[in-house]
Image (tube, rainbow, N blue to C red):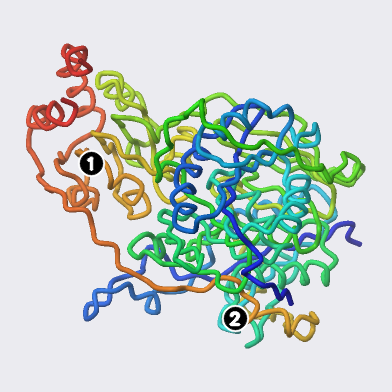
Amino acid sequence: MTEIDPDEYEGVWVFVEEHAGEVMPVSWELLAEGRKLTETTGQELVALVIGEDCEAVAEAALAHGADRVLVADDPVFEPYRADPYGAQFRAMVEERKPSIVLIGGTHTGRDFAGRVAVPTHAGLTADVTEIDVDEAGILQARRPAFGGDVLATILCEDHRPQMATIRPGVFEAAEPDPDRTGEVERVEVVVAEDETMSEVLERVVGDRADITEAERIVAVGAGVEGDLEPARALAAALDADLAATRAAVDEGWIDGSRQVGQTGKTVRPELYVAVGVSGAIQHVEGMNKSGVVLAINTDPNAPIFEHADYGIVGDHAEVCHELADRLSGETPELIA
Amino acid sequence: MHDFTVVVGVKQVPDADEVGLDPDTGRLDRASAPAVMNPPDRCALEAALSLKDAHAARVIAVTMGPPMATPVLREAVAMGCDDGVLITDRAFAGSDTWPTSLTLARVAEHLDADVVLCGEETTDSSTGQVPPGIAAHNGWAQLTYVEALDLRPEEGRVVAHRDVEGGYEVVAADLPVVVAVAFGSFEPRPAGLHRKLFAETEFDPRELSAADLGIEEEVGLAVSPTSVGGMETVQPVDRQGEVVDEVDDLLGPIREAVA
């Protein structure tokens, strides 16, 4: 049994997820939100950067709000692997005792969080969409439960650190301030390549769309039955980004980086057009901060119509093409 | 003679499609929903059975739960698993992902697993934390969001395609390894008739308790770091819900939204 004194733990850490120097935007969202927590607790906001040649990432973390950046810089950390990252994180937590650790809910973030929470006997809450901290420093991590109809508050009172993975897009990043100063501290690397248990043979990353910033979105669901052309045409006419439900992603029609909803991303565009989307609560929960929601579906009883401002019952291909035709002439003025 | 042992974790969950609202309280009524196998676990079973197709592997399904969770083991055996183990004990009550993954880690050791396969996450808790937790408890390699899996006995490792944001990576990991398969990959095979009959009529799961695993003091509510502090019903966002007849009727709202 792990008995610890929570009072020995302080500060908010944010895991800055980077791949070959490219930072996942959720990391900056978490620094902005972590800043709010440290304003309540009066403690330090620390960015954790693990990778190779991370000076630029460390500087960017300061600009995005960190008071201090801890850098574990070594070839063993590039590309990401759970086992060396996990061993390094454990050593740093044991030495420095952070109270709260925030991690982006990407595939890498969830892979990392699940591993590192165990050896430190930390409390880990997944897919959090709201966070707060009370005067005693207890993190209130709220997450959708039962498919999104309920928001559950998860606490971790007797263990540290209090960890959470946070869905990309729910918080807004701060504008980077290049004049911000802080300490960049290189930490001792405790992992050697010959101790690792895994090897990345190949890494192919192409379409890593950031739909969380999109002003207009056309989202496809299972109802399009693999025919994305009409939705693409509408997206082009609206100058919108394409997004999808989990069902469409699982079918392989579109990349997972464009998934909206639980286990995907939260978006808040001014216009959200749901094409062949049934309206499962898990999806709706990721898009209900949108300005105006339009729904196109063949099924008049589809739940999406209850979550839309305007809906039309009809074939997605016909409706999308007709809308695209009507709008394509006026797109420039729409943008202006 | 089996060269490899593959352990598959499966879980019984309320059927997400059948969870209704309690008409009196307006709250979700999970108790009345029928219990089914967590759908992502079916993909994990398929991944395990395809390893068995290619190698001399023994596949054992394990589940944590009360005896009434046994049907998910029968289903796994009907699909082609060689055995099923029910991990059942009152001591497990109130376990969050930390003791749950500890228990499964000890089971994996107990069964001498070379590969542990799990679904991506459960539909009732959707944390996805248990597979990395199992790997961490045992100090084993882990691979999550796996879309394709190849066992390389001569190298003593597996090679997997992992789904990552915007692409994929190919990763090799030493045995023993914990693999969480991406939901939607590995189309589950139907149960064969003969095997189904066996599962229904002859199969009885082995049972393991916390004491059998030597972890009576390390499971349950007391060692779970997290607790539920409260639940609030989410108020639906108020939408106009206006269904129009003509495509042209949508143009006004679109123009207004993007103005």
Question: Which quadrant is the N terminus of chain B positioned in?
Answer: bottom right
Q: Amino acid under label 1?
A: Asn
Q: In the shown orientation, is residue B116 left or right of residue B197?
A: right
Rounded to the nearest whole Å, what is the CA distance between mark 2 and mark 1?
A: 45 Å
Residue A313 on image: x %, y %: 16, 40
Query: Badge 2, how many Cα within 10 Å: few under 14, some, many 20+?
Result: some
Query: Badge 1, how many Cα within 10 Å: few under 14, some, many 20+?
Result: many
Tell which subunit mark 2 falls on.
Answer: B
Helix, strand or loop at disc 1?
A: strand
Q: Is residue B225 above or below residue A126?
A: below
Residue A67 on image: x %, y %: 57, 42
Residue visible at 49% across and 33% down? A255
Residue visible at 30% across and 29% down? A215
Question: Which quadrant is the C terminus of chain B positioned in?
Answer: top left
Residue B54 on image: x %, y %: 79, 47
Q: In the shown orientation, is residue B54 left or right of residue A321?
A: right
Name the disc covering residue B221, or none. 2
Q: In the shown orientation, is residue B67 left or right of residue A51?
A: left
Q: In the depicted view, which residue is nearer to us: A316 or B169?
A: B169
Q: Amino acid under label 2?
A: Leu
Residue visible at 31% across and 27% down? A231
The residue that mark 1 highlights is: A297
Q: In the depicted view, which residue is nearer to us: B67 or A67?
A: A67
The quadrant where residue B116 appears: bottom right
Residue visible at 57% across and 80% down? B94
Q: Is residue B229 above or below residue A303?
A: below
